[in-house]
């Protein structure tokens, strides 16, 4: 089968379009023939060698995709051959076929657009569980969304709109500001040209927000804590600008008397809790069918051009998701 793999970490050029042996499913596994593959920023971090968990090399990257079940390993009963499914949290999706553990193979209706299906699990489940399972955000409260025009950012905005939660997005250009507003953001701030802290104070009457969802890290935490309301929390789920460069003990300690907190979140932990995984997946599929959420596909790119897709994602020009087509 055709696949995109890396033999070493580095720039997008390390992504190689190659022929590899098609895998076979073992006990409790499913072999899926992929039709659409979603690119996540975690793929970029893995390729560059910056992700906390990098698979042994050579490795096929890619964390999610959609297609149909090709064959089943022993003990798999919740899907059948020929059934439409989405695969998530499984490294190896930059390929024509992928083997996945059955607990991360989600049945979907045949009528569901495969590109939309590939784009929803990591982004929308991350957004949903940060807001609800972790953040306990309530209608009428406010959240700040870093990278508001990105895949997870747009997912947060769309889900917040459904739940009656006010969103303040942060992004880097007038074009992305308009895009985030089109997704339903109540306010969007250009962090390159505006005083973010001052604008948030104005928008919240000096109170701050109850929740900040941060996929950037770098030097952003100090400002984040200044923008939190008492009892508020920052949920950190990515590091597009690198690992935190501030002293977290000092930052959190300086806000101790306001009961502000910091938590980390990785969607993989949800995959290991069947009741959370199943409930939230069914809800997101329902929202997709009802048109309440709609993944934004920036571009569909042939699998053979995965290196170009990574270059595009790193250029910060992407609004929504990139989809690879095998």
Image (tube, rainbow, N blue to C red):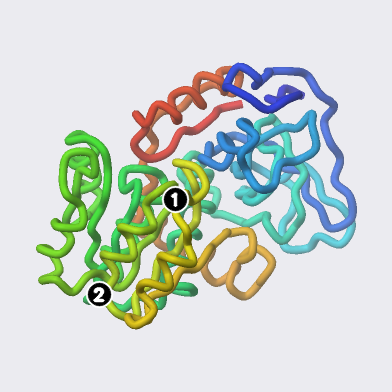
Please name whichever residue, 88 or 208, is drawn nearer the observer in this view of the structure.
208
Please determine whether, in this image, residue 307 is positioned above or below residue 110: above
Q: Residue at x 25, y 49 (%)?
A: 183
Q: Residue at x 46, y 44 (%)?
A: 116
Image spot of residue 46 (x, y percent): 63, 37
Mark 2 neighbour density, 10 Å: few (under 14) some (14–19) many (20 or more): some
Image spot of residue 33 (x, y percent): 70, 37
Numbered label attached to residue 184: none
For residue 111, say whether it is visible. Answer: no
Q: Which residue is drawn at 46% across and 68% down?
A: 262
Image side of residue 323 versus residue 291, left or right:
right
Image side of residue 262 versus residue 108, left or right:
left
Q: Is mark 1 on a helix, strand or loop?
A: loop
Q: In which quarter of the image is residue 161?
A: bottom left
Query: Residues at badges 1 and 2 in contact (C-beta under 8 Å)?
Result: no
According to the picture, the residue beneath numbered tag 1 turns out to be 217
Q: Which residue is drawn at 36% across and 49% down?
A: 294
Mark 1 neighbour density, 10 Å: few (under 14) some (14–19) many (20 or more): many
- Quarter of the picture containing the N terminus is top right
According to the picture, the residue beneath numbered tag 2 turns out to be 141
Q: Which label sits in the foreground, 1 or 2? A: 1
If you read the primary sequence from the N terminus, does the residue marked by circle 1 or circle 2 appear first?
2
Q: Quadrant of residue 165?
A: bottom left
């Amino acid at each position: 089968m055709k696949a995109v793999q890396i033999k070493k970490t580095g720039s997008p050029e390390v992504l190689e379009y190659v022929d590899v042996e098609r895998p076979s499913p073992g006990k409790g596994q499913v072999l899926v023939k992929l039709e659409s593959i979603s690119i996540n920023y975690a793929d970029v971090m893995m390729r560059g060698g910056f992700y906390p968990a990098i698979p042994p090399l050579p490795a096929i990257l890619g964390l999610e995709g959609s297609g149909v079940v090709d064959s089943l390993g022993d003990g798999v009963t919740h899907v059948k051959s020929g059934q439409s499914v989405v695969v998530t949290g499984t490294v190896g999706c930059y390929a024509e076929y992928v083997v996945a553990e059955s607990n991360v193979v989600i049945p979907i209706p045949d009528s569901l657009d495969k590109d939309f299906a590939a784009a929803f699990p990591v982004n929308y489940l991350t957004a949903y569980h940060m807001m609800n399972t972790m953040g306990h955000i309530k209608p009428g409260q406010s959240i700040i969304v870093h990278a508001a025009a990105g895949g997870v950012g747009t997912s947060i905005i769309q889900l917040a709109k459904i739940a009656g939660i006010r969103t303040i997005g942060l992004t880097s250009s007038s074009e992305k500001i308009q895009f985030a507003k089109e997704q339903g953001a109540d306010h969007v701030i250009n962090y390159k040209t505006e005083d973010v802290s001052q604008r948030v104070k104005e928008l919240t009457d000096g109170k701050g927000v109850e929740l900040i969802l941060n996929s950037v890290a770098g030097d952003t935490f100090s400002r984040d804590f200044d923008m939190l309301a008492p009892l508020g929390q920052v949920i950190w789920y990515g590091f597009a600008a690198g690992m935190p460069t501030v002293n977290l003990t000092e930052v959190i300690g300086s806000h101790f008397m306001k009961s502000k907190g910091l938590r980390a979140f990785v969607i993989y932990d949800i995959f290991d809790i069947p009741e959370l995984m199943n409930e939230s997946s069914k809800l997101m599929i329902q929202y997709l069918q009802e048109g309440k959420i709609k993944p934004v596909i920036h571009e569909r790119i042939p699998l053979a051009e995965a290196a170009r897709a990574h270059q595009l994602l790193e250029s910060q020009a992407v609004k929504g998701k990139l989809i690879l087509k095998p």
